[in-house]
Image (cartoon, rainbow, N blue to C red):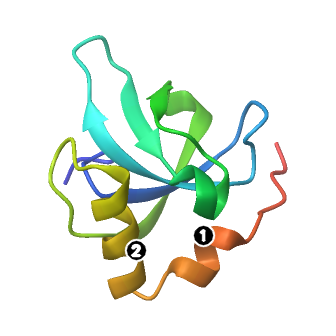
Amino acid sequence: MALYEIGRVCVKTMGREAGSYCVIVESTDDGFVVVTGPKHISGVRRRPCNPRHLEPLDKMIPIKAGDKDEDVEKAIQEAGLDDLFREKVRVVL
């Protein structure tokens, strides 16, 4: 089991989006991952992210690599996680 696989739900721990939930959408060749919130749900816009700035959770949503934000949003709603994504987590380092 890969820790940072497509569809893994994570919490951002660094930056202006710290404490927001996001989903891994893609994995790049340079060791980064592409995450999305989507922005209108959790405030995390689609962008590359260093995996060291993420805290992976045990939750997964069924998406394919590179899915659009609309597809990710639909998968979040089907999994019943839309209320979770609207919350913020207090990150303690």
Left or right of 88? Residue 21 is: left
Left or right of 16? Residue 60 is: left
In the image, residue 33 lies at what x, y percent? 37, 30
User: Residue beneath label 1, please?
Assistant: 85
Q: Residue at x 60, y 64 (%)?
A: 41
Image quadrant assignment for residue 75? bottom left
Kindly report the distance in space between the C-alpha atoms of the residues bearing marks 2 and 1.
Answer: 8 Å
Q: Quadrant of the N terminus?
A: bottom left
Q: Residue at x 77, y 64 (%)?
A: 88
User: Residue beneath label 2, please?
Assistant: 76
Q: Residue furthest left?
A: 64
Q: Look at the numbered disc 1 and give the secondary structure of its residue.
A: helix
Name the amino acid, label 2: Ile
Name the amino acid, label 1: Phe
Position of residue 46 relative to residue 61, above or below, is: above
Q: Earlier in the sequence, mark 2 or mark 1?
A: 2
Q: Which mark is residue 2?
A: none
In the image, residue 46 lies at what x, y percent? 47, 37
Position of residue 16 relative to residue 29, above or below, is: below
Q: Look at the numbered disc 2 and give the secondary structure of its residue.
A: helix
Image quadrant assignment for residue 35? top left
Image quadrant assignment for residue 58? bottom left
Left or right of 3? Residue 53 is: right
In the image, residue 12 lies at what x, y percent? 63, 45
Q: Quadrant of the C terminus?
A: top right
Q: Residue at x 40, y 74 (%)?
A: 76
